[in-house]
Amino acid sequence: MTGSTAKTTGGFGLPSRHVWAVAKVVGTVLMTFLGLLLVTFLIGRVVPIDPVLSVVGERASQETYEQVRREMGLHLPLWEQFFRYVLQVLRGELGKSVLTAHTVVDDIIRVFPATLELATMATFLGVVIGVPMGVVAAVNQGRWPDQLVRLLGLFGYSMPVFWLGLMGLLLFYGILGIAAAPGRLSFHNLDVVESWSGVILLDAALQGEWEVFFDALHHLILPAAVLGYFSLAYISRMTRSFMLEQLRQEYVTTARVKGLSEARVIWRHALGNVMVPLITVIALSYANLLEGSVLTETVFAWPGLGLYLTNSLLAADMNAVLGATLVVGMIFIGINLLSDLLYRLFDPRAR
Amino acid sequence: MMKVSAALATVLLASTAVGAFAATPKDALVVAATIDDITSLDPAEIFEFSGGDVANNVYDTLLSIDPNALDKGYVPGVAESWSVSADGLTYVFKIRQNIKFHSGNPLTADDVVFSLARAVKLNKTPAFILNQFGLTKEAVDQRVRKTGPFEVTLTIDKPFAPSMVLNCMTATVTSVVDMKVAMANQKDGDFGYEWLKTHSAASGPYKLVNWKAADGYTLERADGSWQGNASLRRVIVRHVAETASQRLLLIKGDVDVARDLSPDDVAAVAKDANLKIQDDLKGRITYFSLNMKNPILAKPEVIEAMKHLVDYDGIRSTIVRGRAVVHQSFLPRTFLGAIDDAPYRLDVDKAKALLAKAGYPNGFNVTMDVRSAFPTTDLSQSIQSTFAKAGIKMEIIPGDGRQTLTKYRARTHDMYIGSWGPDYPDPHTNADTFARNPNNTDDAKLTGLLAWRNAYGIPEMTLRTDAAVQEKDSKKRAEMYGDIQRDHQRASPFVIMYQQLLQTGVRKNVTGFHTGGPVSSAYYWTAKKS
């Protein structure tokens, strides 16, 4: 701070140090995005894949090839291509994807809700099951519940999610017949609900189409459980180690000496203090899932962001790659801000 | 990924599905397929397999192919009859008078002229099929004319064999587009191109409801097609990339047709009493080629030795199990002039002798660019091991398909392994690329021709290929292609190995679903359900 005090005010009647702080955050975010774009753009241009071929295919005549190359602006110098792209983004346009023939914005609006739905459900499962599991393991350190939780965690952590997905499908869909088929909806429910948010559960609930809602939920459970198992493994392990650290602290002994019930000591006092570092763990795991999980999406025919980003990257479909990267960047920044806010809520020192 | 799942599938082959059975709707055909190759649904641009399937059911082409008689070749389509002038340069097509577009507009000669001119002027990849007849951007308006409300006259620049011209008129690029609808959606003089990438303006048995890239598409019956009404009201095609998932969907009854099954999946499906496997010969052939810019590979003895260093039968029975037949010439079986000669088999001693004669008794080092996909990678590994028996140390350079293709088109590879599918049902489609190279210099950039990509300079064979495509007598034409193929088989730097066999899993209550054989795309509108 340059000599300003809390009493001097900036524009809009706000103290100038707040204005400065906001400006700093905005500036950092902008620089992050610019850097992100530049790096992604350069990577896209140095990979030995010819994006024109993605459009024209193997058979095109040289004339067609040149024509498309010009249409895509690839004949321009690199810096000019980048400059044009940034200008375009500033105008709020992300351009068209050559693979899908739609604008990148339309594509993201279509694929992101699928990923959001999957990632949110997976994280929800990971938290409601993973956190208690971690607590139980810590309290019973070294005894069988602990060993069981650690074994489950190890299994979830080391099994390829792709394999787990196929096995899950085979068992729960193929043999037992209790899970739904791959895909987001049954065929007779396709195009029944209007797409408002793209999150089918939400759209169906808002439009009162409960059959579609439960069908969507039925389809969501298995992929979410598979993905959720992975985050459950991570979250339970982290909860366990955070809890072990807390349970050794003097305040826990004090609380017990004071005669508080064991449940209150563990779930209220110790877990309360674990929440702060745990939020970071959960937020990061959620952000990772929001990037999309290519393998899960492949096995479950789930048209999400991960699959979209990967396909675009392999085709050097740069508008799509850059657009999706921006979204991923925004997710990370957004979730970081959110976990900062939650810190303040749970940690009195941060207020 | 497919390999992993194939292994898993084998482990669990014994497990039979006993869970709840979900039937697909009675009036819909539900298909699981890999369809992420669709990048546009404009018939002037469609060139990949899955897009061709959509066009084949949504659009009507100038001439057509009868799904129940694929071998017959071209039959009447939008044009109900035609005549060819004595000099072979003028074609007059009579347009069927009772066709209506999905919009309700009648289909007339104006639409046909518009559609052909549009395809040429947009100049997307398949435009070359029309370009070969002199239909260039500048000339197309003179060469394709309306000569009556239901009559179109086409004037070509060289006296091609009529069978060649008429075969080409069955290609997707000749699909008749509803001019009024396309022009109503025109932007910046694009003939409605941006709009037609994701919509349809057609007259076929089905209309496009929606297409979501790498997700799926839905078609709905359009009553009143001149070919008769489709039996099923809807066709739902869902993108399922994983073959094991496709198989599960089929076995559980959630789909009627699974189009990409691995050999293990096929084995499992074949055992199921409610399912059948449909085998269809397709036109795609698999080969590897040698770049003639590499002085070692350019030696005739080296070329011949390599043709003896492939375990054709071993690969067929272990890697491509049931999905290919051994085929060693450039025209797919069932094409006019195709030959069955397969003179090569694995013969290490003979190859060694040839290599010694070429001056490489201990072999040499070489690289092969390989697209990381099944079965290309597996094929290259087999070739690598048989090469090693003769002392040739082959390094595999793996890459994404577009990456290896970029290198191939720039002629910077040593060896390349790939496939080639015919673009239209005429022998010239493959002869043009394998046996024709009018200018072998780097500057010529004839990147569409495989002979050029491999720097295979063949002035004499080029002339013979050009003569064959103008031969009017079909029998003589077939003989000419036979001769060219035999010479090509002996001396060319192409080691042709297989022709594709398609194995489709279909529920037994579905009949009349055709994959289109070597010459066409899938027919949904002929499918029925009992």
Image: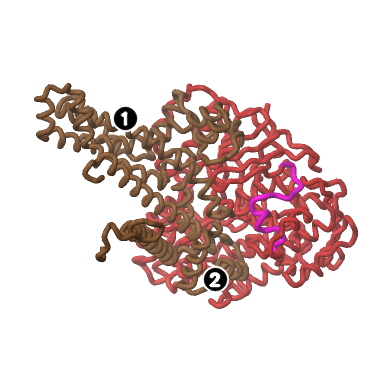
Q: What mark, if any, has residue A129 been given in the picture?
A: 1
Label 1 environment density (alpha carbons within 10 Å; few <14, some 14–19, many ≥20): some
Please tell me which residue is depicted at 51% across the width and 50% down the height of the picture. Answer: A108
Residue B456, percent across and down? 54, 71
Q: Circle 2 sits in a helix, a strand or a loop, which is it?
A: loop
Tell me if residue A164 can be seen. no
B206 up-or-down from B126: above or below: above
Residue linked to disc 2: B456
Q: In this orientation, which residue lies closer to the viewer: B373 or A340?
A: A340
Residue B309 horizontal side relative to residue B254, left or right: left
**Amino acid type shown at disc 2:** Tyr
Tell me if residue B355 can be seen. yes
Please tell me which residue is depicted at 73% across the width and 49% down the height of the picture. Answer: B59
Identify by letter the chain in red: B
- Which residue is situated farthest in the right direction here? B148
Q: Chain A: what color? A: brown
**Amino acid type shown at disc 1:** Ile
Q: Circle 1 sits in a helix, a strand or a loop, which is it?
A: helix
Q: Quadrant of residue B84?
A: bottom right
